[in-house]
Amino acid sequence: MTDPTTRQVVDEALIQMMQEISGRAADEYWEETILGSDVNQIRHLFYFLQAERRIVLVNYGSDVYRSRVIEVHNTRTRLQIPEFHEEGIRRCWVKFEIVNVLYQFEVPILDIGDDWIEIRIPAFIQSATRRKNRRIFL
């Protein structure tokens, strides 16, 4: 028989290896981050979206919703989505454009309200595409 301390260390190592294999370890991060890291850059993108009241597209199930960022916390943000209909899915795609760069993230949904959802801010940039031609809004 092994002692409980050794067993706990082995269990933690096993859990860590399983998270690395499944890719979940990259989704987890601490509130205290290193300056200049992806987490801080992404968090500031959401602060910018909130300040400028920019449109954020949310692909949820088979629907595409137009939303706005209404709150930003350390690791989560709240999006206001009028006429949102919950389908039981707990992940969505979030798309927005800032300075001619289209960002796309697949994020977990943490909470759902009447006209809002709360999502986790991604820990790393998943997709950022610079447009060849500038878009002009009329």
Image (tube, rainbow, N blue to C red):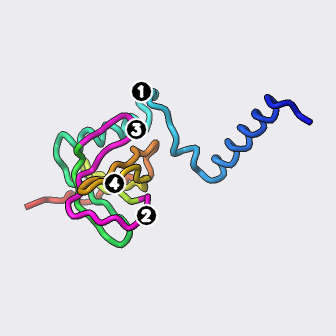
* Residue identified by numbered label 3: 75
**Residue that sits furthest to the bottom in the current view:** 62
Q: In this view, does 6 lie above or below 135?
A: above
Please report whichever mark, 2 or 3, sits nearer to the chain's N-terminal start. 3
The residue that disc 2 covers is 89
Secondary structure, magenta segment, majority class: loop
Residue at image position (20%, 60%) is 82
Please provide percent x and percent y for residue 41.
36, 37
105 drawn magenta: no
* Horizontal arrangement in the rendering, residue 87 relative to residue 78 (left or right): right
Which is more N-terminal, label 4 or label 2? 2
Range of residues picked out in magenta: 71-91
User: Which amino acid does the dot numbered 4 rest on?
Assistant: Ile
Residue marked by disc 4: 112
Residue 8 can be seen, yes or no? yes
Q: Residue furthest right?
A: 1
Q: What element carries label 3?
A: loop
Of labels 1 and 2, earlier in sequence is: 1
Residue shown at 24% from the left, 40% from the top: 48
Circle on res. 73: none
**Quarter of the view holding residue 135:** bottom left
Q: Between marks 3 and 1, how big is the CA–CA gap?
A: 15 Å
Nearest to the observer: residue 12 or residue 111? 111
Q: Residue at label 1? A: 35
- Separation of marks 3 and 4 at Cα, in angstroms: 16 Å
Query: Local crowd at mark 4 within 10 Å, few (<14), some, or many (≥20)?
Result: some
Is residue 96 depicted above or below 17 in this figure?
below
Q: Quadrant of the C terminus?
A: bottom left
